[in-house]
Amino acid sequence: MTGALQRALDGRIAGEVDASDRRRAEYSSDASNYRVLPAAVVFPRTDGDVAETLAFARAEGLPITARGGGTSVAGNAVGPGLVLDFSRHMNAIHEVDPELRTARVQPGVVLSALQRAGAPHGLRFGPDPSTQNRCTLGGMIGNNACGPRAVAWGRTSDTVRELRILDGTGAERTLAADPAAVPGLAEFTRANLAVIRTELGRFERQASGYSLEHLLPERGSAVAKAFVGTEGTCGLLLAATVDLVPVPAATVLVVLGYPDMPTAADDIAAIMAVRPIAVEGMDARLVDVVRKHRGRVPELPAGGGWLLVELEGETPGEAVETAALLRTTAHAVATRLVTDRAEAQALWGIRADGAGLAGRTPDGRPAWPGWEDAAVPPDQLGAYLREFEQLTREHGVDGLLYGHFGDGCIHVRLDLPIADAPQRFRAFLEDAARQVVKFGGSLSGEHGDGRARSELLRHMYSEAALAAFAGFKSLFDPDDVLNPGILVHPRPLDADLRLAGLRPLPTVGGFAFPDDGDLGAAVHRCVGVGKCRADNHASGGFMCPSYQATADEKDSTRGRARVLQEVVRGALDWRSDAVAESLDLCLSCKACHSDCPAGVDMATYKSETLYRRYRGRFRPVDHYALGRLPQWLAAATRAPRLANALSGVGVLRRTGLRAAGIDPRRPVPVLADRSFRRGWRQRDNESEVMLWIDSFTDAFDPEIAWAAVRLLQGLGLTVRIPERRVCCGLTWISTGQLDGARKRLRATVDALDEHVRAGGVVVGLEPSCTAALREDLPRLLPEDPRAVTVAGAVRTLSEFLESRPGWAPPDRSGHTVLVQPHCHQHAALGFAADRRIIERTGASVIEITGCCGLAGNFGMQRGHYEISVAVAGNALLPAVRAAAPETVLLADGFSCRTQADQLTGRRFRHLVQFLVEP
């Protein structure tokens, strides 16, 4: 049926239609707990495509669900019929008018792109949710998004001037402030005046249900504003005209410390009296989790909970004066004034990091959305928080609390008993709903009701109000085509849960997953927050390089996780085309492991999946050629000149590369005339250090190892290397040959054990190999206690040098250094020690924040060349082209150096060479 559906619609639109198993899996969930497989996914290019798709859906009896960035936490953006992804093509900013302070945009525009467009005019869009580098304006309008600065600039509904939509019948309507735009709306409003005036619009964050209060004559009969927050149930957005606000001339940050969060909430009235532009709360447990995962955090005043209060002024002095007033009128136990912008951003970073890390409880259990963003009138917030803490204790759930305290909105993810649904899961949500209503609050303060809370609206609203909601929807969508089961005639809150019914996945001898238990639980770490889709123009970063090149959900960490979630639940086979296509462009860069708020580790999941897929079967030829590369290099280094000569013959090179599954456009790296091991002679001193000689350094760049030897011997150390040629198993791991990887790692542990037991450390030069020893070794040999000890003894060169109290780097003042951190170094080892050492030399540092695109075997494999080059074009190539000829180019990774050399002709050096050689 799905294939026939795709063929029937495909010829009617300019955009794409995809009903494949893989695509349906990718769009089966958003950032919520819910899983609903669509019949097909449509990527419209034009308004006409949207109209044709809607007409087709109506004719076929299919529901239709609009989707932007897919970051909805309540199941607002999933549906069983056609899902329309507006972010792929309909993402234009048609106009920014600095005089009117407005912007006209398509629904798929990412918020950060709009912020960049407004910045040259000193303007910005007011609401700023934490997902602003991937959420779209269409999604924000659908959910009435807010963010920290809603206390000053309002919610999305406060910004909307005009919306152009298709209603559920296919009629195009322009919504502004005229009820006549929707037949019957004026009469509907008059008939429901009493219920609208008494039950809706009671406080600013009353986001649950429809915001019908905007229809009131005294509120300007603002039809467009009433449409905001309808969660795709009343129309498909084609274009929006929204207000922009001036960027503040000056801001300062005041951090207020309180004994606990309820006490902080009690002080909101005093804080709001100085008209702040943001008031954010976070408790001590949240800060502790950030400190645990991120290291040091900026200084906070004394307290068990804090409010971050941002103030503005026409001048810095005026902002500081307001801050001084706040510090005297607030009832905090301690305060801190922050005027330095970088320090203020670091403090806001605690809040931002905490929002991501709240996906785990303090003791490491998974925490889920579901009761995500309840809100109460601010004057009730302290009392509500005290009772909510008692409720969570009674139900045995826990989570990290933060939120927009200035307008009474609280965020918390809890270790909800989803596996026990509907029993304990439903019981908690029902009790939580009754409790928030007791305080005059709203089930949702900014994320909408979706599948998570629509059923609970009966606790919050009268039968008359619920009937008004149904009547409002019927004016726009009389046949219930648009996002059915949301808000009106809701689906049960415990239906369609992604985690319900999952069984443990038996191990087959691959990776151990000590933090999750098994691969099934590990892939469900992905709750869909979508940071892997982030607009890197705004944020920079390494995740997710293939998505940055293609802008296709298939190539996001989230998309791959969704496919693997279908595999572990038995809906897709390990050997299916869907799985192969999903993982094909994963670079195994590991950036998601460090950058994803949920700690998704797609490189490991890919390796485990390849292992399961090819167990007992023939593998692709490049797995043998590239996956076992250290074996071939060990042989080639016996006659490097012959190997180089043969690879230099065009016909032989091209034929050989094709036969090996390697793209013939790739030059073959040149072997050194003499490998490091062949020239090594040990000299003894009093102290010793083990230098890990990886296959790449040994065969291609032995001068790097010799530079390390000179540096370490200059410190009075005896440099040793493993007596036998041993390997970290990296290339076996990346191709899923885990039995072979374990064999090599056992030999490595045997070779290093005596040195490590004597208190020695192992210093690595190649980041990917060093990361494999530190991170993959204990997970592949969980039964060997020596593996953990050896992994704990592995150091990067910079880490080792920083541990030597008498060592000082050479003076390199006057140099400018452009450095490319290796992805595995960024993700598994950290680049901070390298950065500090380079800065200590006196050199100016420019850091490339993006993947090189070669990524070991990935960029060499046939079919990956174009994507590899496109990934390099995100960060590496522009940085190298902009670098002056005298700029020092540094990259510790062999892949990074190779990619830069092949694509730009400029040679990068290793950090150790920079430290040893002028």
Image: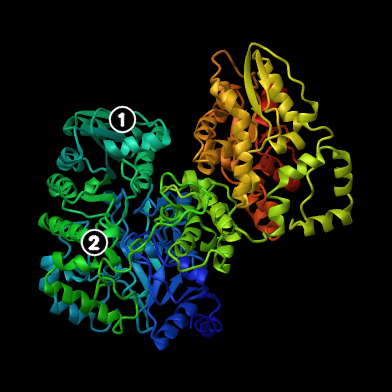
Residue at figure coordinates x 74%, y 43% from the top left: 631
The answer to whether residue 900 is left or right of residue 178 is right
Residue at figure coordinates x 28%, y 43% from the top left: 280
Please name the amino acid that badge 2 sits on: Ala
Q: Which mark is residue 199?
A: none
The answer to whether residue 473 is left or right of residue 44 is left
Label 2 secondary element: loop
What is the quadrant of residue 348 in the picture? top left
Q: Farthest top residue? A: 686
Return the x and y of residue 754 as percentages of the image width and height.
Answer: 59, 24
The answer to whether residue 183 is left or right of residue 610 is left
In whole angstroms, how far apart are the C-alphas of marks 2 and 1? 32 Å
In front here: 552 or 102? 552
Return the x and y of residue 220 as percentages of the image width and height.
Answer: 22, 68
Please name the amino acid that badge 1 sits on: Leu
- Asked whether the residues under the numbered discs 2 and 1 touch, taking CB atoms below 8 Å apart as contact, a structural biologist would say no
Return the x and y of residue 539 as percentages of the image width and height.
Answer: 49, 47
Give the answer, above or below, for where 465 lies relative to 815: below
What is the quadrant of residue 777 in the picture? top right
Evaluate whether residue 627 shows in this view: yes
The answer to whether residue 304 is left or right of residue 642 is left
Residue at figure coordinates x 30%, y 81% from the top left: 480
Give the answer, above or below, for where 23 lies relative to 270: below
Q: Which residue is mark 1?
A: 300
Label 1 secondary element: loop
Q: Which residue is mark 2?
A: 207
Return the x and y of residue 669 as percentages of the image width and height.
Answer: 78, 44
Q: If you read the primary sequence from the N terminus, does the residue marked by circle 2 or circle 1 appear first? A: 2
Residue at figure coordinates x 45%, y 69% from the top left: 571
